[in-house]
Amino acid sequence: APFWMTGEFWGQGIERTKIYDAGFDNMINFDFQEKAGASGAALDRLFSDYANALAAPATHNVLSYLSSHDTALFDRKKLFDGAAALMLAPGGVQIYYGDETARPDGPFTSGDRQQSTRSDMNWDSADAALLAHWRKLGQFRARHVAIARGTHRKLGDAPYTFARVHTSDRIVAAVGASGAVKLSVVDVFAGGTRLRDAYSGAEATVAAGTVELTADPRGVVLLEALK
């Protein structure tokens, strides 16, 4: 069976460097963590830059993360937003243990500040709402290769809405949605197509290049065509 070889080189970002010529298929991406808290236009720039660098037929890939034992834990107060940014990001992604449950920092010594990132898993105090959020995003990502490898196109600003398309696979997602929303799906889903929001479970039919539905209070909408 085919396999992928991942490498680590401190400071490596999304660019294709000569290290890939040594046989690595993807490299750990040190660029993402500091940008994962972006929203609106900044988040679209992040997604657009990544998609342009990594969409097929790109000859390299990256492995992005929110937290790492080498750097720091992502801000625990922003994990809902960080999870959406990571799980909707182009390229490969990895979930550092406890980002899905809000595992807190642990003790550290004066000589090893990063030791705090390796605390015990919080099995008895997992944030159930955060875990459910990660599961919805993760299951949606697993069904759609377009998220990782597709072309990226912004469809709207309020809420921030975008499409990813890879051959026959296509999705539309929105972040920052609130209440009843009308989202553009123009040139992604044809009129009359029945769509499902994988986050809230709501269904809607495309009409005049848009869909209307009520977003989950978390503000995330994940649209896919009903089979």
Image: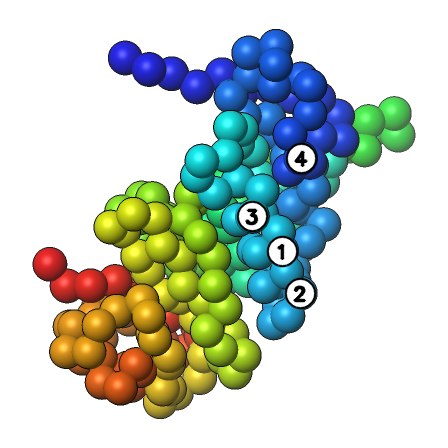
**Mark 3 touching mark 2, by CB under 8 A?**
no
Q: In the rendered view, tell whether residue 7 sits above or below residue 166.
A: above
**Disc 2 designates what residue?**
42
Please indicate, yes or no, whether residue 148 appears anywhere in the rendered image.
yes
Q: Amino acid at mark 4?
A: Glu
Residue hosting label 4: 15
The residue at which mark 3 appears reads as: 52
Count up the numbered dots.
Answer: 4
Give the structural element (helix, strand or loop) at label 4. Answer: loop
Quick one: quadrant of the C terminus?
bottom left
Rate crowding at label 1 as few (under 14), some (14 to 19) or many (20 or more) other CA atoms within 10 Å. Answer: some
Q: Amino acid at mark 2?
A: Ala
Task: Residue 104: give x, y in percent of width and height.
Answer: 62, 46
SS at circle 2: helix
Residue type at mark 3 is: Asn
The Cα atoms of the two marked residues, 4 and 3, are separated by: 11 Å
Neighbour class for label 3 at 10 Å: few (<14), some, many (≥20)? Answer: some
Whether tag 4 and tag 2 are in contact, CB under 8 A, the answer is: no
Q: Earlier in the sequence, mark 4 or mark 3?
A: 4
Residue at point 73%, 35% (across, down): 71
Q: Residue at x 62, y 51 (%)?
A: 49
Which mark is first along the chain, 2 or 4? 4
Cα gap from disc 1 to disc 2, whole angstroms: 6 Å
Q: State the residue at coordinates (59%, 63%).
A: 44
Instruction: Point out residue 14 in the picture as x, y percentages from the top left corner.
Output: 64, 37
Badge number at residue 46: 1
* Kind of element beneath mark 1: helix
Q: Quadrant of the N terminus?
A: top left
CB-based contact (under 8 Å), mark 1 and mark 4: no
